[in-house]
Amino acid sequence: MKKACLIAPLAALALFGGLYAAYSIRRDATVATQQAQAAAARRDKAERDQAALVASREAAATAAAERQRVRLAREQQEAAQKDALAAAEQRRTHAFEHERKLRSQIDRRRADVARATESLAVLTPRQQELAAESAFLTDYLQRADPNREAYYRLLENLEAADKLAAAAPAPANHPKPGGQ
């Protein structure tokens, strides 16, 4: 029995060692597989996190670029509106100045028209007088034209008589008419 007491625990120990070794190998393989899976999961998670980080950075950069583009577009639109407003204000100011200038010209022209109307009112009777005088002179010339030839003949006859009287001898002691 002494041998059995020694062999049985040794056999049990060997059986336990064999079972433990098989279990330990399986457990080590399972742990290694679990560790490998955990490491792979961590790598996958790290890769996903890295990809998500890169994607979020790209999205942030894209969003920042979009915000920058929108801000620039808004600034350009505001600048264009500001320029348009300034141009409209300048056109309005120019129009007011032009209107003021034209109003003064209109006032001067109205004064000129009033003076011209007064001058015409003064000159109209004179023009009527001159027209009447012109009509009279035209009528007079038409009536005097036939008499002109008669006057020229009369003048020629008088000149001829003067020449004859100058050529004739002067009479001696003629009594003067009137009896003296």
Image (cartoon, helix red, strand yellow):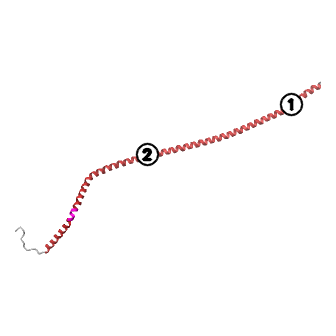
Can you give x and y, in whole percent of width and height, for residue 95 in the image?
A: 42, 46
Report which quarter residue 176 is drawn in: bottom left
Residue labelled with disc 1: 19
> Is residue 180 at least partly visible in the picture?
no
Task: Give the answer, above or below, for where 144 lies relative to 56.
Answer: below
The residue under label 2 is which amino acid type?
Answer: Thr
Can you give x and y, in whole percent of width and height, for residue 3 in the image?
A: 95, 26
In the image, is residue 117 part of the stretch drawn in magenta?
no
Residue labelled with disc 2: 93
Report which quarter residue 137 is drawn in: bottom left
Q: Could you tell me which residue is drawn at 36 percent across and 48 percent down?
A: 106
Q: Secondary structure at mark 1?
A: helix
- Magenta residues? 142-146
Report the magenta stretch's main SS: helix
Can you give x and y, in whole percent of width and height, for residue 41 in the image?
A: 74, 36
Task: Give the answer, above or below, for where 136 lies relative to 165.
Answer: above
Can you give x and y, in whole percent of width and height, for residue 91 in the image?
A: 45, 46
Q: Could you tell me which residue is drawn at 79 percent across and 35 percent down?
A: 33
The residues tagged by marks 1 and 2 sit, at their Cα atoms, a distance apart of: 106 Å
